[in-house]
Image (cartoon, grey):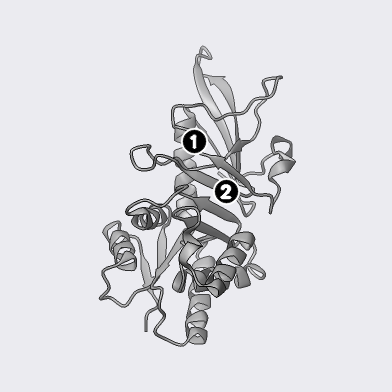
């Protein structure tokens, strides 16, 4: 159910382009922030990965907010239900009612996933960039026309960077189009060339949302990032030569195993 959410529930501190970085709390710690009057107030929207996978996770958030109220239902008013509101980084709004906050968030995640597309591709591009940009634009517009609104990139050199820049170009003309950058660890650009660093940081600055999965590098962090992107999308746009055995191959195969449609732009 999509309805307008009262803006009084939101904090001006989280207006668009105001980025907050925060540590993710363990799943068993309540995350609702209440004022002294006990009224519902905004909650920072985040994804929590199990502590067995990541010892520390951080996320940078721009205008992704959730709020909820509790109400009593049933014949004797003994059943508690949650009236849940969520507004995404591009302003799209989601509302649901469930018997627990966890059920509300699962419904939200399913909704977000249904509207999301992830990119994966090689760092080295074997064809002319202008031609690949044209193919990217056509594929993104095609996905947009089917209702996709959230486009996720890992921020790596090569196809990830090119895809992010194309989304940013199209965002000027396509309402609600949003770029989300899923960063495997803070400082992933440490070994980028100076020119690649400039492009990467410009993308982070202009992205609608940046999710940083770990404060530090750890083994398989790139594969963990790729799995995250597959698990949070309903479509994959790839640039895959079909013979590689690296991260792009892993991501495409994982998407196929989950029966997620894959559009391969490799010539």
- Disc number placed over residue 73 in the picture, else none: none
Residue 175 lies, in percent from the top left, at 65, 63
Earlier-in-chain disc, 2 versus 1: 2
Assess disc 1: are there few (<14), some (14-19) or many (≥20) residues with their C-alpha within 10 Å of its C-alpha: many
Which is more toward the observer, 262 or 126?
A: 126
* Looking at the image, residue 78 lies above or below residue 138: above
Which is more toward the observer, 176 or 55?
A: 55
Q: CA distance from mark 2 to mark 1?
A: 22 Å
- Residue found at the very far top of the displayed protein: 76
Name the front one of labels 2 and 1. Answer: 2
* Looking at the image, residue 84 lies above or below residue 199: above
Residue 155 lies, in percent from the top left, at 49, 64
Split into 4 quadrants, where in the image is the N terminus?
A: top right
Split into 4 quadrants, where in the image is the C terminus?
A: bottom left
| Secondary structure type for disc 2 | strand
Residue at coordinates 40% horizontally, 78% vertically from top-left? Answer: 124
Task: Identify residue for label 2.
Answer: 60
Instruction: Assess whether mark 1 and mark 2 are in contact (beta carbons under 8 angstroms).
Output: no
Residue at coordinates 34% horizontally, 57% vertically from top-left? Answer: 223
Residue at coordinates 44% horizontally, 32% vertically from top-left? Answer: 27
Residue 12 lies, in percent from the top left, at 74, 42
Q: Is residue 25 left or right of residue 43?
A: left
Residue at coordinates 48% horizontally, 38% vertically from top-left? Answer: 105
| Secondary structure type for disc 1 | helix
Q: Can residue 229 be seen here?
A: yes
Task: Identify residue for label 1.
Answer: 104
Assess disc 2: are there few (<14), some (14-19) or many (≥20) residues with their C-alpha within 10 Å of its C-alpha: some
């Amino acid at each position: 159910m999509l309805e307008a959410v009262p803006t009084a529930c939101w904090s001006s501190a989280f207006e668009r382009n105001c980025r907050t970085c925060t540590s993710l709390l363990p799943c068993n710690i309540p995350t609702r922030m209440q004022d002294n009057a006990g009224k519902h107030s905004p909650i920072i929207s985040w994804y929590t990965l199990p502590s067995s996978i990541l010892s520390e996770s951080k996320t940078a958030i721009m205008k992704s907010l959730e709020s909820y109220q509790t109400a009593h239902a049933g014949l004797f008013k003994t059943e508690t239900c949650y009236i849940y509101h969520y507004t995404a980084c591009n302003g799209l709004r989601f509302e649901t009612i469930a018997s627990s906050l966890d059920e509300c968030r699962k419904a939200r995640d399913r909704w977000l996933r249904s509207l999301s597309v992830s990119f994966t591709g090689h760092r080295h591009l074997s064809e002319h960039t202008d031609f690949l940009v044209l193919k990217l634009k056509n594929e993104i517009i095609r996905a947009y026309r089917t209702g996709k609104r959230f486009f996720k990139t890992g921020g790596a050199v090569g196809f990830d960077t090119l895809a992010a820049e194309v989304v940013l170009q199209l965002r000027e003309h396509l309402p609600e189009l949003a770029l989300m950058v899923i960063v495997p660890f803070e400082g992933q650009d440490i070994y980028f060339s100076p020119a690649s660093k400039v492009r990467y940081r410009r993308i982070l600055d202009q992205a609608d949302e940046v999710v940083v999965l770990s404060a530090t590098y750890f083994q398989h962090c790139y594969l963990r990032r790729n799995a995250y992107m597959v698990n949070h999308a309903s479509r994959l746009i790839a640039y895959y030569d079909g013979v590689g055995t690296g991260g792009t191959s892993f991501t495409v195969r994982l998407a196929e195993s989950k029966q997620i449609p894959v559009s391969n732009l490799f010539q």
